[in-house]
Amino acid sequence: MKGLKDKTEQIINAAVKVFIKKGLQATTQEIAREADVAEVTLFRKFATKQNLFVTVIKNALEKQFDSHLFKLAEEKDTEEFLVKIIENRLEILSKNSALIKMLVSESLMGNLPDEVNLPNMIFSSIEKGLSRHFQATGKTADTELLARQLSGIFLSQVVFPAEQPYHQLEEKVKHQQARQYARAVLSLM
């Protein structure tokens, strides 16, 4: 069984590379070749290419998008909370830009199941975090509107990338940029 577990990691890592290059058009043969495993090994573990794709995407993004957000929501100062969300999300999106671009493209074509539809994942996790924050602080806000604005900021970084990726900027510049975005979002309240 240990060999199969090792193969799972090997398959997931290879699948990420192939899906980034080809999106859902990637074939199981290409993934198996990249993973250096027999195609039957893919099917034994994941049954279908769709299952493999969902597993890969959830593995790559879900943990990063939800878990940290709820911790950030405990921040009492709303502007600081927004700055922290923005810094965190822009860092994740910037570091994973090739994967994110592929997901946005597949999403716009209507090819992704809801559970890995990136724009929906971004929006719903942000809205949950905002709701949690405003509930904890006793403030009221239109969390759907704020989540839409934040999602727009995040997706615009992928669709209209800056000359220098966010994760490569100096910390001071990152923080200034995040604060500007946070203040723009706060102006909607």
Image (tube, rainbow, N blue to C red):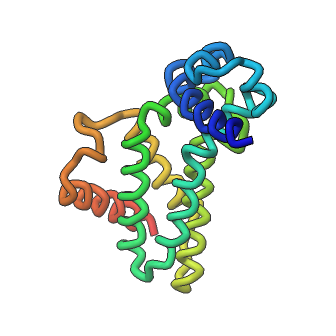
* Along the viewing direction, whichever of 187 and 118 lies nearer the viewer: 118
- The x and y percentages for residue 15 are 59, 28
Q: Quadrant of residue 138?
A: bottom right
Q: How many marks?
A: 0
Left or right: 158 in relation to 111: left
The N terminus - image quarter: top right
The picture places residue 132, in percent across and down from the top left corner, at: 59, 74
Q: Is residue 72 left or right of residue 162?
A: right
Residue 21 can be seen in this image = yes
Q: Quadrant of residue 70?
A: bottom right
For residue 102, above or below residue 74: above
The answer, for residue 187, to whether it is visible in the render is: no
Q: Residue at x 63, y 45 (%)?
A: 58
In this view, 52 is above or below 27: below
Q: Nearer the viewer, residue 96 or 152?
A: 96
**Residue 2 percent across, percent down from the top left:** 69, 42
- Quick check: 141 above or below 178? below
